[in-house]
Amino acid sequence: MSERRSFLKKLAGVVALAAVNPFANKAEAKGIKLTGTLVHHVFFWLKEPKNPAVRKQFEKALDDLRKVPSIKFSHTGVPAGTESRDVVDHSYTYSMITFFDSQEGQDAYQVDPIHVKFVEENSHLWNKVVVYDTVDI
């Protein structure tokens, strides 16, 4: 049994490394330089953030959205339980950050049928969306 656990731990480590491998060749000391990468960060404020059925539908929709082929890496999340400060906004319900190899990848994402379907089937669930798109300096 301990051999299986050891194998699973090693496998999890390999999977984690594989997830960031596309960026590894662009790494620099003191951080990762994502040269040419476009980062697309979307914040959603749901109309009914406490409704379990709405949350379940939206979480599934976010999971499906991550299947767009031009997305190289993504993360979906909810506000962290960090301290309240003037510069920290905990008011959103969900966020999704996606990384694309280029502007062209993000452009393809915008018209991809998966993304179009996501907007069509879920836009009635939110009352506000804010997007931050960035490229490296």
Image (spheres, rainbow, N blue to C red):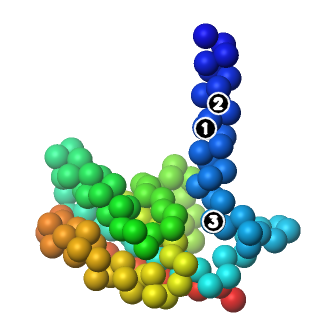
Residue 9, numbered circle: 2
Callout 3 touching callout 1 (CB < 8 Å): no
> Callout 3: 10 Å neighbours few (<14), some, many (20+)?
few
- The tag earlier along the polypeptide, 3 or 2, is 2
The image position of residue 99, as x and y in percent, is 52, 72
Residue closer to the observer: 114 or 44: 114
Amino acid type of the residue that numbered disc 1 sits on in the rendered structure: Ala
Amino acid type indicated by mark 3:
Pro
- Residue 22 circle label: 3
Does the rendering let one see residue 95?
A: no
> Label 1: which residue?
12
Measuring from the top left, give residue 70's x and y in whole percent: 43, 73
Q: Which type of secondary structure does the marked residue at label 1 adopt?
A: helix
Amino acid carrying mark 2 in the image = Lys
Report the front residue among 69 and 50.
69
Distance of label 3 from label 1 (alpha carbons): 17 Å
What residue appears at the point 61 percent right and 10 percent down from the top-left corner? 1
On the rendered structure, is 16 left or right of 124? right
- Cα–Cα span, label 1 and label 2: 5 Å
The residue that appears at 37% across and 82% down in the rendered structure is: 108
Tell me which corner region of the image, top left, top right, bottom left or bottom right, holds residue 76: bottom left
Q: Secondary structure at mark 2?
A: helix
Residues at circles 1 and 2 in contact by the CB criterion of under 8 Å: yes
Taking the spot 74% from the left edge, 69% from the top edge, the residue there is 25
Percent x, y for residue 3?
67, 16
Residue at 54% in and 58% down? 84
